[in-house]
Amino acid sequence: MDKATIIGLVAGTLTTLSFIPQLIKIVRSKSTHDISLVMYIVFSTGILLWLIYGLLISDVPVIVANAVALFITITILSLKVRYR
């Protein structure tokens, strides 16, 4: 694995993991009052497009990071709708 791929995987891991504390807070508190629905819709759409881009160029770090991030943000969006 080359340096660029390793850096991409580390960067993708860190940025993707940044959503975990928010998800944990939502699950524990069952509150999404301070979460912007529009922001998560727009952000999730952007992540989906990055995932498609990664698939088109066959870039493993882009694919993995955005697939996991999309799963997390869709989960947060689902909880936002559920706990309204």
Image: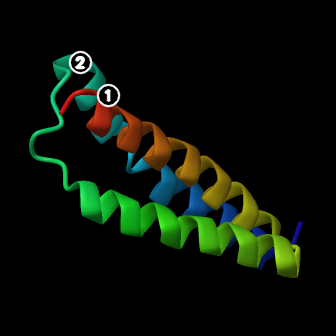
Query: Circle 2 is placed at which residue position?
Result: 28
In this view, 54 is above or below 25: below
Eyeballing the image, is 12 above or below 26?
below
x, y percent for residue 70: 56, 52
**Residue 24: mark:** 1
For numbered disc 1, what is the local secondary structure?
Answer: helix
Rounded to the nearest whole Å, what is the CA distance between mark 1 and mark 2?
6 Å
| Mark 2 secondary-structure assignment | helix
- Identity, as a three-letter code, of the amino acid under mark 2: Arg
From the top left corner, tell me how far across and down residue 49 is, in percent.
62, 74
Q: Label 1 sits on what residue type?
A: Ile
Q: Residue sitting at 22 percent across and 27 percent down?
A: 83
On the image, the x and y values in percent for residue 80 come to 28, 38
Q: Tell me which corner region of the image, top left, top right, bottom left or bottom right, holds residue 81.
A: top left
* Label 2 Cα neighbours within 10 Å, binned few <14 / some 14-19 / many ≥20: few
Which quadrant, please, contains the N terminus?
A: bottom right
On the image, which quarter does residue 54 sit in?
bottom right
Q: In which quarter of the image is the C terminus?
A: top left
Q: Which residue is drawn at 37% across and 44% down?
A: 77
For image coordinates 58% across by 62% down, the residue present is: 12
Question: Which residue is rendered at x = 15% and y = 28% of the image?
Answer: 31
